[in-house]
C-alpha cells in the first residue's frame, strides 16, 4: 500500500527536474535525474526493474522493464516524446496489471509545462485501469 502523498511527491520531483533541465533531452537522462531527485527525498527507487509475471503457471521473466518503482508501490514510466500515444497508455495499464501495482504515473518531459506531462493511472479492477488528468 502506497501513501496517498507519494504520487504528489513524485510529481513535484518531476517538476523540479523539468524546471532544471527543460525539454529536449533523451528519456534516459530524465529517468536518471528523476531517480536522483527522488532519492534526495529519501524515497526508495528501483530503476529499470525487470517485469516478471505468472502466465498459466509459468514464470515469465524480463518481458519488459519498468522505468522506476518508487517505495515498492508506485510505478513511474518516463517518456520524452512530442505526444503520448494510446499505445503508451495501454502499455502502462498492462505494466500496472501484470506488475501488481495499483497506481502509476506516466511522465512525459517533452512538454512546455510539466503538469501537462503527468498522467496518473489507478488500477480500478483486476483487468481495468484508467488515466486521471
Image (tube, rainbow, N blue to C red):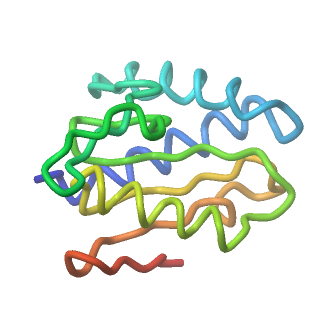
User: Going 73% across and 68% down the picture, which residue do you hit?
Assistant: 85
Q: Is residue 78 above or below residue 87?
A: above
Q: Is residue 104 left or right of residue 23?
A: left
Where residue 59 appears, as percent x and y from the top left, is 21, 39
Q: Of 20 and 7, which appears nearest the observer?
A: 7
Where residue 10 appears, as percent x and y from the top left, is 43, 45
User: Going 26% across and 54% down the picture, which residue do you hit?
Assistant: 5
Q: Is residue 48 left or right of residue 1?
A: right
Q: Is residue 10 above or below residue 55?
A: above
Q: Is residue 76 above or below residue 29?
A: below
Q: Quadrant of the C terminus?
A: bottom right
The quarter of the displayed image where residue 103 is located: bottom left
How many numbered discs? 0
The quarter of the displayed image where residue 89 is located: bottom right
Q: Is residue 17 left or right of residue 10?
A: right
User: Going 58% across and 21% down the picture, which residue do you hit?
Assistant: 32
Q: Is residue 72 left or right of residue 61?
A: left
User: Going 49% across and 60% down the picture, which residue do you hit?
Assistant: 92
Where residue 76 appears, as percent x and y from the top left, is 45, 46
Amino acid at each position: 500500500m502506497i501513501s496517498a502523498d507519494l504520487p504528489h511527491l513524485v510529481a513535484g520531483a518531476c517538476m523540479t527536474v523539468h524546471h532544471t533541465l527543460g525539454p529536449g533531452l533523451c528519456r534516459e537522462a530524465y529517468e536518471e535525474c528523476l531517480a536522483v531527485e527522488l532519492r534526495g527525498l529519501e524515497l526508495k527507487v528501483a530503476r529499470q526493474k525487470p517485469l516478471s509475471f505468472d502466465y498459466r503457471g509459468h514464470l515469465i521473466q524480463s518481458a519488459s522493464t519498468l522505468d522506476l518503482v518508487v517505495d515498492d508501490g508506485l510505478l513511474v514510466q518516463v517518456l520524452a516524446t512530442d505526444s503520448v500515444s494510446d499505445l503508451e497508455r495501454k502499455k502502462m495499464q498492462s505494466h500496472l496489471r501484470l506488475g501488481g501495482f495499483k497506481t502509476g504515473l506516466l511522465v512525459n518531459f517533452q512538454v512546455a509545462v510539466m503538469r501537462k506531462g503527468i498522467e496518473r493511472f489507478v488500477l480500478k479492477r483486476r483487468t481495468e485501469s484508467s488515466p486521471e488528468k
